[in-house]
Image (spheres, rainbow, N blue to C red):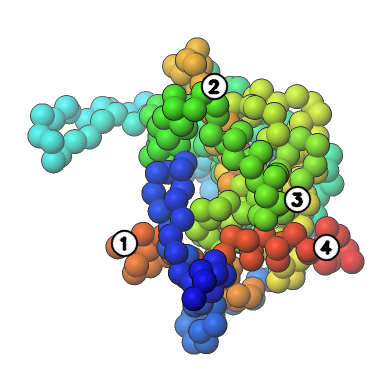
């Protein structure tokens, strides 16, 4: 029997993390009798006077939001990290180690209207979001080693507020995920003399098996090593190490890519598609003067939905105790996304 990647289980290597994922495509044939999520509500008002992210509303700490007409950024009222805290005592015990962790957390509203998610915004409005991301990176990156921009969209991904927004956490340390990527990209560059993700995006453009959307400056693929069912990676065609290195043209074309990708996501199951997403680039703060040519700036989208708007992928059992596992192959997922229309189903 000849091996068929869409029929037979196999493992795939993730060079960014240095680990493996189990692919089990035959499991897509099994019936589902597990948990079903509630359908995503579509009746969100443009303005809710009780929503603490809306313009003119009083937040829990007593501060009043301005009547903003574009993006709006404020320090999180309930931050995971603070700037001024005591440092733990050093320990010589290898089993009980701790270290200082300082930082700040900000919330960034994309738009004054609560019912306008990114795929429903105009490209110019998304470009304004990108400009604000870069402004925040420049500000926080002067001091902090890592600035993590991320968006949790949808209740199924833990988002407690439907207003379109993201969070920005800046830390004095480099978190685990970017630290792994830093190490593996550095090792690849030392071995081959080229940035790993530039080699990767060029090979994906040649193969055309996992492409989702492209334009003159950006390429979106379902990574060969994807874990989440419809996971995607946003990659630049030009070697860019940080978001702050983008040209005006690249910012504009990135807005186009974000709108097209998120529209396809919504069109897949005709719902406001949930995901967690974020941007990774070279570290900042004390690393701003370091040689970071091994780094390639990129974005990651991790959506949980698998079969429909109500059935999600669970990361439990084998995933938690052994290694990541997926059913749908990356190629199958890319094909499903690629052929979807780029006009949002609400506007079709």
Residue at 76% over, 31% down: 250
Q: Identify the mark nearer the N-term, 4 or 1.
A: 1
Earlier residue among tags 1 and 2: 2
**Residue 24 rendering spot, x and y as whole percentages:** 47, 70
Which quarter of the figure has residue 199?
A: top right
Q: Please, is residue 92 above or below residue 305 in the view? A: above
For the residues bearing labels 2 and 4, Cβ distance under 8 angstroms: no
- Which x, y percent locates residue 272? 70, 64
User: Can you identify the residue that label 4 sits on?
Assistant: 341
Q: What element carries label 3?
A: strand
User: Which labelled disc corresponds to residue 322?
Assistant: 1
Q: Name the residue under label 3.
A: 213
Question: Quick one: label 3 or label 2, which is nearer the N terminus?
Answer: 3
The residues tagged by marks 1 and 2 sit, at their Cα atoms, a distance apart of: 33 Å
Of marks 2 and 4, the one in the foreground: 2
Q: Does residue 42 show up?
A: no
Structural distance between the alpha carbons of marks 3 and 4: 11 Å
The numbered mark, 1 or 3, whose residue comes first in the sequence reads 3
Q: Residues at badges 1 and 2 in contact (C-beta under 8 Å)?
A: no
Identify the residue at image location x=67%, y=60%: 334
- Tag 3 near tag 4, CB within 8 Å: no
Real-space Cα distance between discs 3 and 2? 26 Å
């Amino acid at each position: 029997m000849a091996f068929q990647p869409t029929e037979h289980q196999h493992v795939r290597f993730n060079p960014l993390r240095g680990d493996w994922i189990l692919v089990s495509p035959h499991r897509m044939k099994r019936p589902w009798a597990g948990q079903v999520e509630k359908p995503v509500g579509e009746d969100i008002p443009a303005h809710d006077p009780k929503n603490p992210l809306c313009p003119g509303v009083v937040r829990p700490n007593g501060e009043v939001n301005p009547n903003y007409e574009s993006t709006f950024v404020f320090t999180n009222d309930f931050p995971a990290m603070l700037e001024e805290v005591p440092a733990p005592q050093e320990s010589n015990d290898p089993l009980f180690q701790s270290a200082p962790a300082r930082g700040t957390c900000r919330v960034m509203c994309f738009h004054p209207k609560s019912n306008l998610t990114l795929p429903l915004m105009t490209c110019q409005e998304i470009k304004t979001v990108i400009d604000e991301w870069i402004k925040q990176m420049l500000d926080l990156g002067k001091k902090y080693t890592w600035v993590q921009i991320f968006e949790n969209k949808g209740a199924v991904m833990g988002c407690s507020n439907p207003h379109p927004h993201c969070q920005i956490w800046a830390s004095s340390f480099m978190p685990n995920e970017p630290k792994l990527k830093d190490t593996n990209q550095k090792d690849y560059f030392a071995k081959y003399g080229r940035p790993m993700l530039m080699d990767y995006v060029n090979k994906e453009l040649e193969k055309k098996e996992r492409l989702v959307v492209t334009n003159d400056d950006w390429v979106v693929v379902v990574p060969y090593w994807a874990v989440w069912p419809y996971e995607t990676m946003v990659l630049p065609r030009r070697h860019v190490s940080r978001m702050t290195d983008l040209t005006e043209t690249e910012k504009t074309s990135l807005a186009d890519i974000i709108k097209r990708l998120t529209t396809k996501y919504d069109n897949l199951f005709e719902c406001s598609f949930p995901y967690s997403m974020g941007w990774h680039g070279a570290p900042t703060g004390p690393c701003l003067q370091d040689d970071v040519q091994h780094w390639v700036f990129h974005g990651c989208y991790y959506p949980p939905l698998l079969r429909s708007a109500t059935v999600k992928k669970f990361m439990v059992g084998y995933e938690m105790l052994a290694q990541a596992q997926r059913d749908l192959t990356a190629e199958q997922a890319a094909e499903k996304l690629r052929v979807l229309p780029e006009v949002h189903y609400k506007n079709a």
